[in-house]
Amino acid sequence: MHKRRIRRSPGEMAFDGFNVLFMILLCVIMIYPFWYVMILAFNTGADAQYGGIYVWPRVFTLENFVYVFKYQTLRSAAVVTVARCLVSSVFGVSICMMTAFSLSKTRLPGRRAIIIFFMIPMFIGGTVVSNYIVMAKLKLINNFLVFVLPGAFSYFTAVVMRSFIDNQPIELQESALMDGANNYQIFFRIIVPLAKATIAAFLFFAVVGNWLDVTTNVLYITKKQLYTLQYVMMNVIKSTEARSIIDTSSTQMAKQIQTIQDMAYQPPTPQVIKMAIMAVVTFPLLFIYPFFQKYFVKGMLTGAVKA
Amino acid sequence: MKRKSYSIDRVNVSALYVFLAPALVLTLVFGYLPMFSNIIAFLDYNIAKGWFGLASPFVGFKNFAFLRQSWFYGIMGRTVWYSFAGLVFGFPASLLLALLFNELRHLRFKKVVQTISYVPNFVSWVTISGLVYTFLSYESDGILNNILEKLFHMQRVSYMQDPKYFLAVLIITGIWKGVGWGTILYMAALSTIDEQIYEAAEVDGAGRLAKVTHITFPGLIPTFSILLIFAMGGLFRTNFDQMFNLQNAVLRDRVNTIDLYTYFNGVVNGQYSLSTAVGLFQGVVSMILVLGTNYVTKKLNGVGIY
């Protein structure tokens, strides 16, 4: 940013002041909704229904989370979500990287035709229905692979990766060639180690995309064993699922409660259960992302510059 | 970086095709197959008839009769209106925020604010719908109702049951999610502006405002144009994730857009041919919009993407 040596006029100082105030307000708007979710999730349901909780939990409890973690569907959804994040990001990034390497060879016979082949579907793709029919005919409905295969290859990603490979000194590959390396060795021993940061950036992108995706479930999954965290959260938010979580967990806990003889015991309400689920599903990514922000921004920019 | 022909390209070519194979297969299956499956828009489609249902009778443009029916124009008009409104408010928001970021002097503060502004980008529309339904709730946790009641003694309103608030919800959630992330491209464009231009302007007596309007802002125009091309292509669609998560059974018919329609009518209700026809029409118009905008901006200021 440019230095400003000239002294600030009163008008400029007022502007700077307002700007800083605006930024603080912006931060509050961006953060507070999550804070609100958090404090309600840590508050007892019986108390939360009276409202008025804005800054701090009024009657603190961890019980909502106990109920949520007892919810079997959420636990299996966590496994499915982590599995699909790992499998599809590694699979997708590998394919894009391999494609990028091949396309970086400008003399590859048929290269032009291959590029056109990749580009056409970017303009005219399938519709919701034609996609659905293809998935159905390929037996991908209620199949774990529907999380992995359709989104694995992105020509756009491959182009960004190719621009990275193009920017590496060609001499590295040439000298390896002199030493008798073939293209497999050049790819795995030279290109991949060089591209570590780029690969990391795209892996994170893919993990985020997979973590946040719910449309795949909406369109192609009806089987409970393949629910993802986002889908479970959607059911809890949109339907009366929260009620049944409370009921099942309550029966499980009934014995325990009877021994305490606590007649005044009140189970959580759907309201706070929703909040606890939102916290559990949403926050992991929010806490990880600042550490990887560097890569995200870099990946985003290389992509944009190429486009 | 342009490269001359290297002998390296001629060695062990088979490996290169092996590397390309998975991408080619996936593109064929998940790019071309759905594209060709669009022909069901011209069939009286029955999924059970023959392989892929391709033995269904050919009916020509019969499924496109919706183009002469008024219900379709209601949905189409709403689609364009929603995405246009989202564009008008959402698009300048990032540009403006980038300009304000650029004027922050304290670098550490600037970095923290930027990081925080990216946060909503890492949140799904499911979470956002949860937040919206909580904040706009009629119950005691509905913050908006609480504030309006306390400060202005207004009646409590169930916002998410009334279609007239829906567009505002779309616009505001769209901005909230995207405004920070959208600044990244603009900030990158700003960082490429030569320092010396600002210094020269200072020597010529330009104030801070003059520098913004004559240097910073023009520096953002190419980025703005490219983003506009992409956005124009989206004018004929709404964000399915956003629409699907924010709508509910009460609102559905009153906020229906092409994307919701093709999903509910096609995938849920099984009217495959009609929904594909509608979706195909949407796809073709979108493509024309992208190519058209690209052509015009290229003519106007030499910036294009294709």
Image (spheres, coloured by chain):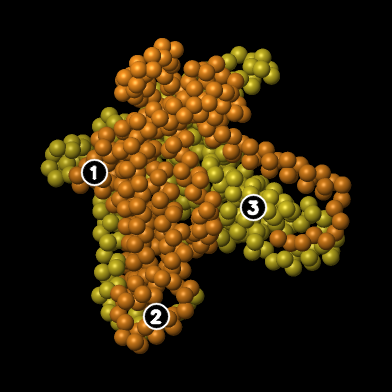
Query: Is residue B223 among the parts visible in the rendering?
Result: yes
The quarter of the image holding the N terminus of chain A is bottom right
Please identify, in this view, whether the residue under mark 2 or under mark 3 is nearer the observer.
Answer: 3
Categorize mark 1 by other alpha carbons within 10 Å: few (<14), some (14-19), many (20+). some
Q: Residue at x 31, y 86 (%)?
A: A180
Q: Position of residue B258 (x, y in %)?
A: 40, 35
**Above or below, comparing residue B297 to residue A140 in the picture:** below
Tell me the chain of label 3. Answer: B
Residue most extreme to the top: A263
- Earlier in the chain: of badge 2 and badge 1, it is 1
**Above or below, comparing residue A82 to residue A200 in the picture:** above
What colour denotes chain B? yellow
Q: CA distance from mark 2 to mark 1?
A: 41 Å
Q: Which residue is mark 3?
A: B111
Q: CA distance from mark 2 to mark 3?
A: 39 Å
Type of amino acid under label 3? Lys
Q: Position of residue B278 (x, y in %)?
A: 34, 37
Q: Which residue is mark 2?
A: A173
**Above or below, comparing residue A195 to residue B32 in the picture:** below
Q: Observer-nearest residue: A17 or A49?
A: A49
Q: Observer-nearest residue: B64 or B3?
A: B3
Q: Residue at x 49, y 22 (%)?
A: A44
What colour denotes chain A? orange
SS for callout 2: helix
